[in-house]
Structure formats: structure tokens, C-alpha cells
Amino acid sequence: MSTTMTITPEPTTSDGIGDKPVLRVRDLQVTFTRAGKRIRAAKGVSFNVRPGKMLAIIGESGSGKSVTVRALMGLLPPSARVSGSADLDGRELVGLSDRKMRLVRGQEISMVFQDPARSLNPTMSVGAQIVESVRTHRTIGRKDAAERAIELLKLVRLPAPEKRFHQFPHQLSGGMRQRVMIAIALASDPKVLIADEATTALDVTTQAQIMELLVDLRERLGTAVIMISHDLGLAASYADEVLVMYAGQVVEQAETSELFANVRMPYTRALLEAIPQVSRPSHSALTVIGGHPPDPSQRIEGCPFRPRCVRATETCVTAPALQEHEAGHWYACWHPVTGALAPGPASGTDGEPGVLEPGEESDS
Amino acid sequence: MTTENSIEDTGPERPEPLLSVRNIVQEFESRGPGGVKEGVVHAVSDISFDLMPGETLGIVGETGSGKSTLARAVIQVDRPKSGSVVFRGEDLTGLSRKELKKVWSNFQMVYQDPFSSLNPRWRIEDVVAEPLDSHRSLSRQERRAKVRELLDLVGLDPDTYLRRRPMELSGGQAQRVAIARAIALDPAVIICDEAISSLDVLIQAQVINLFEKLRVELGLSYLFIAHDLATVKQVSDRVAVLYLGQLAEIAPSDRMYETPRHPYTRALLDSVPGLDPETGVAKRPITLPGDVPSPLDPPSGCRFRTRCPFAQDVCAAVEPRLEPCSGGGFVACHFPLDDDGLTTNGHPEGAKAAQPA
């Protein structure tokens, strides 16, 4: 596999905890061919995940966040071409044969999806499904596997685990089902757990419960967690590190507190301003930007956010590289937001404060 | 529970309510395997509220709290078991199906998934014109002119979109088309049932702003059902909090979000992950333990008592009535929270919970 490492972020290596990353992704590229068109879904994504840490990957639909983690899991359709490198504790995942991938998937890296109702088998009891997962990955007697299943249900704090063991998915609430999914995902002590919008379909109250559980498991088991989400507030509340994706690229990356205290990328800024806030008065207008993310089948010249960016200038025709501009803070932008967080291009630009009319859209 | 008129807020000016919902009860029979009667689902129990002209009433609550059932009962899609719904002086509960059809042009729904509510084979022009075709008789030119006007209003260029089909649209564009169709008959009330929940953050903000624009320009009233409390705050004048089919609290939104009176409202607000866009400081949610009890067998007394940190014996014995509370609005709680988030029952948890997270 080709490994052209033009960009190699090693975020937060300087903090010197000495935690070796359990997963090192470098220059991951995913392309599809659909109706004769080449679609580049992920373009050179690189990141590290450390044991016991939670990394949030943030982005809109089509930003490439799900494609990236599915590539790691070997869950993409055969038409997908994956290149780059993903090193999981010394084992290269990119280019692994289906048969070998099956030994890794669910065993060393596992995933929890958005809709627990559709991920579970409605005709099998909860216990049987966990037992199945336990026995897939190791040689273990039926009785021991059942004991392990109960243990797992306790681990994910499902109330009355012995009773739930015999129940069917439809007898559980959405939150309980997601706990069962997490139990299944943890059946073989994976090194990395991926939660792909795992709380999006749940109520806020249940969402908070499940996130607390993930944070707790991460601490107790030392599992590395990658959470995929579109919810900035959720990422800010729980993740240790945040990676923002746009049009298949990583555009900003830093430790959570650093990133949200000093948002540099205008796209991240726009996301932040578009979220309704409980603290704002009713009927206050939200700051919105026009346009759409670029068509992934079209070649993009320069910064992909350029057509929608209020800070864009001619400089942006050249693609900015993802660089560590400040200690531990990576971003790909020629005109980062600096200083006070006043919206609009008037706030301190570093360099030429050229202003283009916002949102010249190709469509709509 | 609530007597007539007790629900009304005392605002500065009080025009006639557009919609007066009184003591709505909706129950369904639940059948287990083999069609055996299991019990009665208490989906909506005795809910009353008013909706003013030009007002947005947010409706929040967890899954199964009865938000959508309430909306459907209000517009008589599923006839409520009891209660009354008075719209412009006319009680809808007594109307025949035929009479209802005429009234329905005043109520339009916008759903969560625009693609499943738009016919994929139709062109956008026909999708938007469908309500016009069945309620008005327009000439071809009038019809096209009206559709163009509607698309303009929702921010879609008519020349680009008239001839397209739903699958050629993005989620945000499709939702705009659904909104254009909803406003085609100049309705009085738009019911948004999780209308923006499946959209991306940036598109969501655009659609919220569109709803606001239409409210101002067309004088629309909204029933805005959503599970996202921040979004509801953004658009609503007043908010109703539902728990297990009952109103826990209904109040002007600023008051409710600043000083929630019901412990459940408080718990909901606490579980929202917050992020201050100015400082970048995140607010970690405080979790409310447990699940919503089954609506087949709701707890006695206050339905929230099984999860309430302040519950006392009286909460199990006596069902709290919806009563006016300080700062405006109504709350159904024996021990409502005060401005500092303390309960009036002297429970030690009251003081603990009051500490900022």
C-alpha cells in the first residue's frame, strides 16, 4: 500500500505521559468509484489514539468521519480503495485480508452503532447474543461464556443483569439496548472501541448515561475510545482530544480544552456559532453560513471550505496543510481566527484581512 | 386535574387563544402475543394548554412521553379519548371527518425525515402544489405562480428546483420543500415533529432561521416538538415539559430555562451537554439515573417520583396538580424548586443539587 506521508501529525506527544498510541493512523485515503465517478471520501487522515483516552471525530454528514473508521474496521464495500497506514498495536490494518481482518474486528477493535434496535437480532435473547460474541473470539465453554456475559452486563451497568440475560431486545429500552451493544463490543477486551453516533438516537437523559458509561469504561479498562459525532457540545464535554473533519480532510485538531478555548479554523467557528444555546434568549437569530460541503466527486482546488468562508482570500486557492501552528494545536488554514471570538471577518486577522462575499454557492 | 381556564397565563396583552386544548386524554389498548389484552397505555393524561396567535409553544420530553401523540390528538388524526380542542371558537372533537378535512388546512405538519414525507416520483412543483390541488381550484398559471412564490419564501430558487425530484435534493433542501408545502394553504398552525433533528448543525441553523422568518412574515403559530432542549429554547415563547403523558411544567421559556421549577425540567436541562461558544468551556452533563417507567402502569401520585431525588411519601400518595408558580407558568410538583434550585421540602438533596456543576 502506498504510504505517502506528507502530513504526519503527532499531536500531544510533547505532554510526555509516555503513553504509546494504541492506534496510529497515517495518511488514510479512501476512494470509491460510483457511476464512473471517483469519489474521494477520506483524503489523508492522520491521528493517534492513546489507551484510556477518548478521541472525538466531528463533522457533518459526508465529511468522511464514518468512512474513516469503517476503513479501520474493514467494513467498507469492496468497491472502496483504501491506502495509507493504520497501525493497531503493531499490526497494520490497511491491506489486511478479509480473513485476517475478521480476527481483528470485534476482537481488538470493535464498534457500536447509532441504532441499537437494528444492530441487535430481534429473535435472539440478549444473553445468547453476548454469549455468541464471547465464543466467537475465544474457546470457552457455554457455561463460562454465560457467566462472562452476565459479567459484561454488570460492567455496562444494566440493571438486573440476570433477568435481562433471558430477555429479548424489544423488552429493553433504547438506552438498555445500547448498553447491551457496548457489552457485546467489549466481549473480547478490545484495545479500541469506536462509537459511531452511538448516542444520537437516544434521549438527552439516556445520552448522558451512555456517555458516562463510555468515559468510565475508558478509565477502568484502559480502552481507547473513538467517538464519531456531529455534536460539538457532546465532544467538548467528554472527549480528551477532538478532530474536526470537512470534505474528507482533517481541518483542525487539538486537545479538547485547547481546541474549544482557541478555535482557529473558520469552519469549526461556524459550527460553534450555529448551535442553539440554552443560555441565549428565544428568537435570537443564529449565525449561519450559506452553501454546501463540496461535491466529493469534484476535484477541489485549495482549501475545501474556501467557497463558504468569510475569511477566504486568493491565498486560499493553494491548499493549506494541516500543521501544528501552536503547541498541540493543528489546523489547516491560511487565515485562522485569532484573538477574541467576535464573529465576522473584522476580528483580528493575522495577515491580509481580505473579505470575500460569504457563501458563493455552486448550488441553491 | 386542571380546572377550566386555570392554565391560562397572565400575559401583558391577552388576545383570544388560537387553540385551546383542555383535559386531553389519549389511551391505547396494548395487546401482547396472540392479541391478548395486556393493558391500557396511558399515552396522554389530562393535558391542557393554550396556543396564542403567532406564538411558538415548544413541547419537550423523553421518548414515550406523549409529545407526538398529543399533537395527533390535538388535530384529531387520532381522536382523543376525552377532552376538548377549541380552534377559533369551534370544538374539533365534535366534528365529522368531512368537517375536519376543511379545518385541517389550518394545521400542517413538518416531520423529521423530509425524504419519507415527499413522494420520490413527483417533481418539486407537484409536491408543493399537492395541498393546493386538493383544497383550492387554481388555473395552471396561478398554480405555478403560487408554487414559485412558496419556493422563494423558503429560500429555494424556483427556476432551479421546480423541475427537480426529491432525490436530487440535500436533506436541508428537502426539508425546505416540505416547509413550502406546509405553508401552501396559509395555515394558522405548523406542527413541527422533530423537524430539524436529522439535519446537520449548519443546515439546522438555516432551517431554524427559516421557521423564525416565516413566523414573523406570515404570523404563524408553531407547536414545536423536539427532544433537543437548546433548539426548543431558540424558537419557543413558551415550553411545555411532558413526562409520561402528563404536563410537568409549562412556562415562558426564559423563565423555565433560567429557573426550572420541576425537578424533571431541571434534570433534563442538566443532561444537555453545554458548550459556551465564547469561552469554549464545556459543561459536563449531570445524569438522571433510571429509565422512564412503562406507560402501561405509570407510578401512583407523581409519575416522576421514581426518579426524583426529592421525592417524599406524599409524592406517591397524591397526584400533584398543575399550579401557577413564581416567575410565571405552571408546575405540577409538591415541592417545586425555587430560584436557587432549592426545594421547599427541606430535603438534604435539595441543597446538594443546588450547587452549580
Image (cartoon, coloured by chain):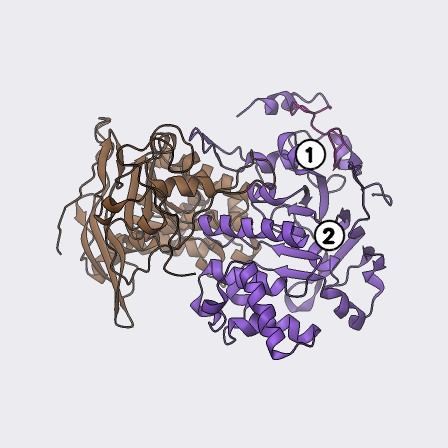
Chain colours: A brown, B purple
The residue that disc 2 covers is B44
Residue at position x 56%, y 74% in the image:
B126
Q: Quadrant of the C terminus of chain A?
A: bottom left
Q: Is residue A54 visible?
A: yes
Q: Is mark 1 on a helix, strand or loop?
A: loop
Question: Quick one: which residue is furthest to the bottom in this view?
Answer: B140
The majority secondary structure of the magenta stretch comes to loop
What residue type is disc 1 on? His
B82 left or right of A13?
A: right
Q: What element carries label 2?
A: strand
Q: Where is residue B242 in the image (x, y as percent from the top left)?
A: 68, 45
What residue type is disc 2 on? Val
Q: Distance between the residues labelled 2 and 1?
A: 19 Å
Residue at position x 73%, y 65% in the image:
B104
Circles 2 and 1 on the same chain:
yes
The residue that disc 1 covers is B262
Front residue of A78/A134: it is A78
Front residue of B177/B310: it is B177
Asked if B251 appears above or below A123 in the picture, the reply is above
